Image (spheres, grey):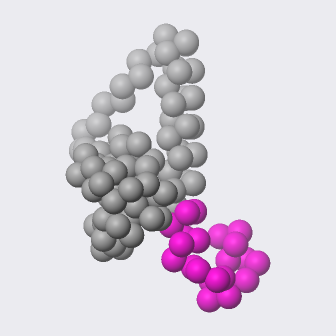
Amino acid sequence: MRALALRPLSEYTNPAAYLRRTMLNLASNAHRSSGRARRALRRLGAPTEARVDYPSDLEDLLQLAPVQRAAVYLAVVEGLSHAAIGETLGCSEAAARTRVSRG
């Protein structure tokens, strides 16, 4: 939202890459934040597992590492090939295939 407040998305050099990187950064931040929260709850002696009455696919996605989540997103939502996913994530095509498969 901050980037869009500065200028329209069409003025960015590569908006798709910018949005993918933003999503990966947000996922990484959320993963680190949830880890800190779990450790704090453990120190307090509070139960770390919350009861979920209606589990969703989103909860399953949040359990993935940020890089695996990004790989799944790029494959399923963006429809990119494994080679393109590897290039975007900075890994080989085989590693990208593995991340998508495991995710």
- Residue 64, position as x, y percentages in the image: 36, 43
**Residue 13 lies in the magenta-colored region:** yes
Q: Quadrant of the N terminus?
A: bottom right
- Predominant SS along the magenta part: helix
Q: Residue furthest right?
A: 6
Of 86 and 64, nearer the camera is: 86
Q: Residue at x 33, y 59 (%)?
A: 93
Residue 36 lies, in percent from the top left, at 57, 29
Within the image, what quadrant is residue 5 found in? bottom right
How far across and down, in percent of the image, does residue 62 sit?
38, 45
Q: Which residues fall within the magenta stretch?
A: 1-22
Q: Is residue 44 above or below residue 58?
A: above
> Image quarter for residue 51?
top left
Most extreme residue toward the bottom, as rendered? 10
Any part of residue 77 in sight: no
Residue at 58%, 71% in the rendered image: 18
Nearest the eye: 55 or 74: 74
Q: Residue at x 47, y 58 (%)?
A: 89
- Above or below, 78 against 36 in this view is below
The image shows residue 30, relative to residue 4, as above or below, that is above
Q: Position of residue 48 (x, y in %)?
A: 41, 22
